């Protein structure tokens, strides 16, 4: 069976690699694309030069379609001038000390300008550009289409999916509350948008006339079969791929995923200032105990300093993991793809 998603994106398999912001690797993205699915690479925090270098590296190892992922500004982001960064840094002092680094001074900026990133994506000319945290501007969607680039948006509710469809995207990811990482809600508060995949996907399918990609809690053939039974045209998978040796996750992060069947995940703002699902560790517990979390992206920048210095220490890292982590049992991404493919309708 050829799905509407395969036709829309020009891929052989209706499987999308989750775009890991900060954890994407060229190796994993290319492997997924070479297998006929859609490899994705998260560009969170990347400036134009780094985006160009990433696209060159991908094209050096695959000529198949891949997606580049961006986070558009929501209007709630802060700049270094907006926050008492020193005060929030002091609240994190024990964690900086544990990582062996001083509390950092304020940077000139937390993130590169979104406009710079978009221009770099146009120059990179991926087959697909995907977005989280909102509906991309009409001018961005129109320019993507003018250049022959397909557009994917991400929704955590039916209302968000409808808004994305009205905004002209070519496909929508319906992201259930089970998913790892950030809750990419843009209508209301993310704490109020925690619909599970099984409830969300069929409602989104009924509400929009574009292909729906099911995400959240899908890690093996059973999840794929369930998603298609609910009307999805494809699946997006994160944690099962993050567990593999081809991902950019640290060995400790991959080990945490392997052991996650015995650990409850939590939704927390502690590590980035935005609600995200992962494994609780020392950093999460101590930050939440302070009651002081800087707004995004200030908190993400601050914790990023000690996370980088900690060099993969699982107690000082962001251990993003979905609720189906206990099903992420494969070390090789090709084996994950084979398992997912076994659940596709024939």
Image (spheres, rainbow, N blue to C red):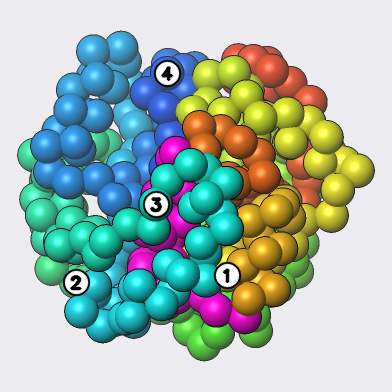
Tell me which segment is drawn in magenta: 291-309
Front in this rendered view, residue 180 or 254: 254
2 or 3: mark nearer the eye: 3
Q: CA distance from mark 4 to mark 2?
A: 32 Å
Quickly name the residue at label 3. 102
Q: Count neighbours of disc 1 (C-alpha within 10 A) and say few if under 14, some if 14 to 19, many if 20 or more.
A: many
Label 2–label 3 contact, CB within 8 A: no
Label 1 vs label 3, nearer the camera:
3
Comparing labels 4 and 3, the label whose residue is closer to the camera: 3
What SS does tag 1 mark?
loop
Q: Earlier in the sequence, mark 2 or mark 1?
A: 2
Residue matched to label 4: 27
Task: Give the mark, 2 or 3, whose residue is nearer the N terminus.
Answer: 3
Q: Is residue 122 left or right of residue 105?
A: left
> Does the stretch in magenta take in 295?
yes
Q: Are marks 4 and 2 in contact (CB under 8 Å)?
A: no
* Magenta stretch contains residue 230: no
Quadrant assignment, res 204: bottom right
Q: Quadrant of the N terminus?
A: top right
Which secondary structure dominates the residues rendered in magenta? helix
Label 4, label 1: how far apart the Cα atoms are? 30 Å
Q: What's the residue at 37%, 23% (across, down)?
A: 26
Residue holding disc 1 = 269
For discs 4 and 1, the disc positioned in front in the rendered view: 1
């Amino acid at each position: 069976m050829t799905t509407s998603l395969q036709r829309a994106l020009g891929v052989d398999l209706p499987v999308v690699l989750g775009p890991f912001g900060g954890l994407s690797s060229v190796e994993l993205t290319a492997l997924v694309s070479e297998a006929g699915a859609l490899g994705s690479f998260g560009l969170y925090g990347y400036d134009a030069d780094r985006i160009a270098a990433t696209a060159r590296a991908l094209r050096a190892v695959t000529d198949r379609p891949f997606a580049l992922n961006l986070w558009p500004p929501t209007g709630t982001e802060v700049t270094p001038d907006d926050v008492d960064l020193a005060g929030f840094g002091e609240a994190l002092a024990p964690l900086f000390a544990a990582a062996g680094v001083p509390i950092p001074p304020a940077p000139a900026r937390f993130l590169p300008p979104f406009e710079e990133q978009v221009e770099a994506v146009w120059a990179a000319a991926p087959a697909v550009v995907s977005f989280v945290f909102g509906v991309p501007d009409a001018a961005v969607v129109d320019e993507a289409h003018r250049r022959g680039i397909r557009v994917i948006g991400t929704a955590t509710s039916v209302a968000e999916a409808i808004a994305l469809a009205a905004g002209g995207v070519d496909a929508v990811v319906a992201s259930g509350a089970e998913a790892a990482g950030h809750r990419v809600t843009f209508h209301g508060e993310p704490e109020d948008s925690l619909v599970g995949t099984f409830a969300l996907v069929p409602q989104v399918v009924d509400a929009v006339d574009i292909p729906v990609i099911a995400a959240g809690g899908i890690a093996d053939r059973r999840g794929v079969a369930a998603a298609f039974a609910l009307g999805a045209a494809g699946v997006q998978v994160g944690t099962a791929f993050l567990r593999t040796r081809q991902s950019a996750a640290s060995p400790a992060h991959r080990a945490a995923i392997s052991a996650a069947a015995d650990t409850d995940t939590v939704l927390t703002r502690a590590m980035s200032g935005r609600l995200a699902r992962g494994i609780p560790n020392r950093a999460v517990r101590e930050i939440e105990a302070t009651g002081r979390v800087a707004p995004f992206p200030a908190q993400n920048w601050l914790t990023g300093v000690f996370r980088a210095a900690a060099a993969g220490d699982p107690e000082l890292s962001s251990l993003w993991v979905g609720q189906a982590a206990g099903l992420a049992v494969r070390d090789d991404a090709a084996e994950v793809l084979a398992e997912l493919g076994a659940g596709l309708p024939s």
